[in-house]
Image: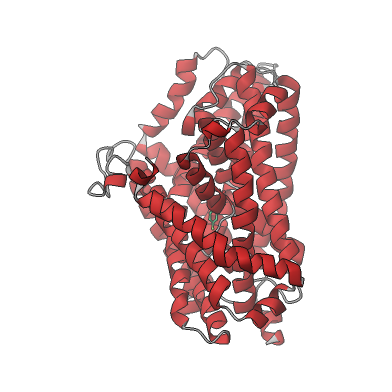
């Protein structure tokens, strides 16, 4: 067993795993979805409730997934089967590993499309910064001379251009596929150890910049002063769902990454480090974006276009806006790529572990298939704009293709995966195996299992039911 573990491809150290898992967790969810939701939901109350969700629900689930991977030592389905066997319960629990692999596969298909928009903005700002340098004024604002309509209009013209969307999607998915095909220590770990330090350096620099040129006080007040009347059932539901998405839970991603951990790693503190880093980045993203938005008097509740339209416009009137805009979109791109890698890794590991495929073949099959689904998602903004894939279902009646895949995975598959994980570990997994593998102290173990057995199933069932029947929220 020990020999098998040491010859297998895996993380070279505990910190490599932590870095890769933080890379998986920190993504578009932190830099795009979190500020969007916080802005739309009125700030403080959402943020505080979100933090509660992360530590009471997300952290226990995160540890549960790391445990399954660590104990199982193979892809999600195989890992759950092994834990089930060692716990003397039905191997059919492994179904949720399969469900997770399908969810991760579907998420990466549209994630790559959205990351493609980011890539486009990297190009826009790189060109703009290039011109600024050539003009001898590298620290000028971004996209000088363009009106707000022109800057906002860039997103509309991008969406109207299927060939451009497709090439961005192709470039992003191709890069993801290439890294996954190279394996854990030679591909994913290398990418994480190069990209994550660069990510943090950029994040801190832009946050300091925001603090200098923008109004941090107003942003902090917006993000942290709760107006509890804004904490509606919809907002709570969104916060719960966001906590799962942001920590990469419910899609077997962390199970898969956890299976490459070598023996002797302390799992509890590892899970805590990942949850703290992910939440810290989401909050820093808020403290980076809102001061800039407030400085120019723009609307924090702009919705999904906050990052793509509001922020570029804000950069126009900022000193060095051209350079900062470029750095900002590079930052988002880096975060997106380390997450998409972890998404594609889930079905890829499944193909390797359960079908006996080689890693490059598995990555190519699933990455290729996800690329095709992504094409439909991006055509939903132009040629197929009237197509409603699940139009017969009231909750998706008005939803375009990308939002349908996003909604179906986020509202249904992800909570279902999280629910089954918490039931499996909270009720069915063998206590001795859990204690031995996690190495938690008695007190921490009792709290962990209580949260998994009771609070997680209850809260996640609420997300699921209210997601399926929104009329219940009134
Ligand atoms: N946690 C990622 C984000 O916040 O963008 C999204 C994600 C990545 C979800 C990997 C699931 C996953 F397995």
User: Closest to the observer: 428 or 189?
Assistant: 428
User: Closest to the observer: 456 or 7?
Assistant: 456
Q: Position of residue 80 (x, y in %)?
A: 53, 76
332 versus 272 height, above or below: above
Can the viewer see residue 409 in this picture?
no
Can the viewer see residue 93 in this picture?
yes
Q: Position of residue 12 (x, y in %)?
A: 74, 68
Q: Quadrant of the N terminus?
A: bottom right
Q: Position of residue 198 (x, y in %)?
A: 72, 45
The residue shown at (50%, 31%) is 40
The residue shown at (42%, 56%) is 106
Locate residue 449: give its quadrant. Answer: bottom right
Locate residue 441: give its quadrant. Answer: bottom right
User: Closest to the observer: 387 or 96?
Assistant: 96
Colouring convention used in this rendered image of the protein: secondary structure
The residue shown at (59%, 56%) is 57
The residue shown at (53%, 32%) is 229
């Amino acid at each position: 067993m020990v020999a098998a573990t040491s010859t297998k491809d895996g993380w070279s150290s505990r910190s490599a795993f932590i870095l890769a898992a933080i890379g998986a967790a920190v993504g578009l969810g932190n830099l795009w979805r979190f500020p969007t939701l916080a802005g739309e939901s009125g700030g403080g109350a959402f943020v505080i409730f979100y933090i509660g969700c992360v530590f009471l629900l997300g952290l226990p689930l995160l540890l549960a997934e790391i445990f399954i991977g660590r104990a199982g030592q193979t892809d999600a389905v195989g890992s759950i089967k092994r834990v089930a066997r060692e716990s003397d319960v039905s191997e059919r629990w492994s179904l949720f590993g399969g469900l997770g692999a399908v969810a991760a596969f579907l998420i990466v298909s549209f994630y790559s499309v959205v990351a493609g928009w980011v890539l486009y903005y990297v190009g826009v700002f790189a060109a703009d910064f290039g011109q600024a340098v050539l003009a001898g004024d590298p620290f000028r604002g971004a996209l000088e001379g363009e009106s707000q309509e022109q800057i906002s209009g860039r997103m509309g013209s991008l969406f109207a251009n299927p060939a451009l969307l497709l090439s961005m999607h192709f470039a992003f998915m191709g890069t993801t596929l290439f890294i996954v095909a190279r394996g854990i220590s030679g591909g994913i770990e290398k990418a994480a150890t190069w990209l994550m330090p660069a990510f943090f350096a950029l994040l801190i620099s832009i946050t300091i910049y925001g603090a200098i040129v923008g109004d941090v006080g107003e942003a902090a007040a917006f993000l942290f002063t709760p107006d509890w009347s804004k904490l509606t059932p919809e907002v709570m539901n969104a916060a719960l769902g966001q906590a799962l998405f942001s920590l990469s839970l419910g899609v077997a991603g962390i199970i898969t990454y956890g299976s490459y951990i070598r023996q002797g790693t302390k799992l509890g503190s590892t899970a805590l480090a990942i949850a703290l880093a992910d939440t810290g980045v989401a909050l820093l993203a808020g403290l980076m974006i809102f001061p800039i938005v407030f400085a120019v008097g723009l609307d924090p509740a702009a919705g999904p276009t906050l990052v793509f339209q509001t922020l570029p416009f804000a950069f126009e009137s900022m000193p060095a806006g051209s350079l900062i805009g470029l750095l900002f979109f590079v930052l988002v791109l880096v975060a997106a790529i380390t997450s998409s890698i972890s998404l594609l890794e889930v079905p890829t590991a499944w193909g390797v572990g359960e079908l006996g495929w080689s890693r490059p073949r598995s990555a190519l099959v699933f990455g290729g298939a996800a690329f095709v689904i992504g094409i439909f998602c991006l055509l939903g903004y132009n040629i197929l704009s009237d197509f409603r894939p699940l139009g017969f279902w009231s909750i998706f009646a008005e939803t375009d293709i990308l939002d349908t895949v996003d909604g179906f995975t986020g509202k249904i598959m992800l909570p279902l995966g999280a629910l089954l994980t918490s039931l499996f570990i909270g009720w069915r997994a063998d206590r001795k195996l859990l204690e031995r593998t996690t190495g938690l102290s008695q007190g921490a173990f009792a709290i962990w299992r209580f949260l998994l057995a009771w609070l997680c199933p209850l809260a996640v069932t609420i997300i699921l039911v209210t997601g399926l029947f929104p009329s219940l929220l009134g």
